[in-house]
Image: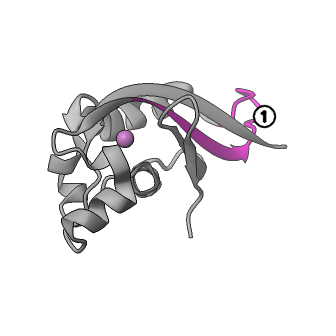
Amino acid sequence: MKAHLTRRYIFSASHRLHCDELSEAQNREAYGKCNNPHGHGHNYALEVTVSGQVDAKTGMVCNLADLDGTVGGEVLNRFDHVNLNQCAEFEAMVPTTENLSEVIFHILKQKFKAAHLERVRLEETAMNSFEYCGD
Ligand code: NI
């Protein structure tokens, strides 16, 4: 039997949406108040979905402690309470939540081997969420 498991995590980070290849006016046009030079913060809710065969003995897709360890060590430690614009991952990429979803997906794809990574879903506000499931 194959099953999906989704676990939810919370972290906070700030960002400024600004693309160096666009003019000041184009940046304001594209990002509105998210282009404010002082940036702004979000309390992100991150959902990670993995899948796999349910182990006949344990009855589990994977051990939640393993998933928590990888998400905690590789994602939350890296992005909680930081300015995303200053992270190496966003040196050459605008830290939109679309891009952050993709970055988190690729980090977890590399680091989490105990089950198949299906999806990363990131809630930026009560009104917006973004999903990335790989190419
Ligand atoms: Ni924002």
Q: Position of residue 135 (x, y in %)?
A: 56, 70
> Does residue 39 sit above or below 130 in this rendering?
above
Q: Secondary structure at mark 1?
A: loop
- The residue under the point 56% across, 63% down is 134
Q: Quadrant of ligand 1?
A: top left
The quarter of the displayed image where residue 1 is located: top right
Q: Nearer the viewer, residue 7 or 96?
A: 96
Which percent across, then down, holds residue 2?
A: 80, 45
Label 1 sits on residue:
56
The segment highlighted magenta reads 43-61
Q: Decide which of 134, 117 is in the foreground and name it.
A: 134
Q: Nearer the viewer, residue 6 or 21?
A: 21
Q: Residue at x 62, y 44 (%)?
A: 50
The answer to whether residue 93 shows anywhere in this view is: no
Q: Looking at the picture, does residue 70 appear above or below residue 95?
A: above
> Between residues 29 and 68, which one lies in front from this camera angle?
29
Asked if residue 100 shows in the view, the reply is yes
- Residue at image position (54%, 44%) is 114
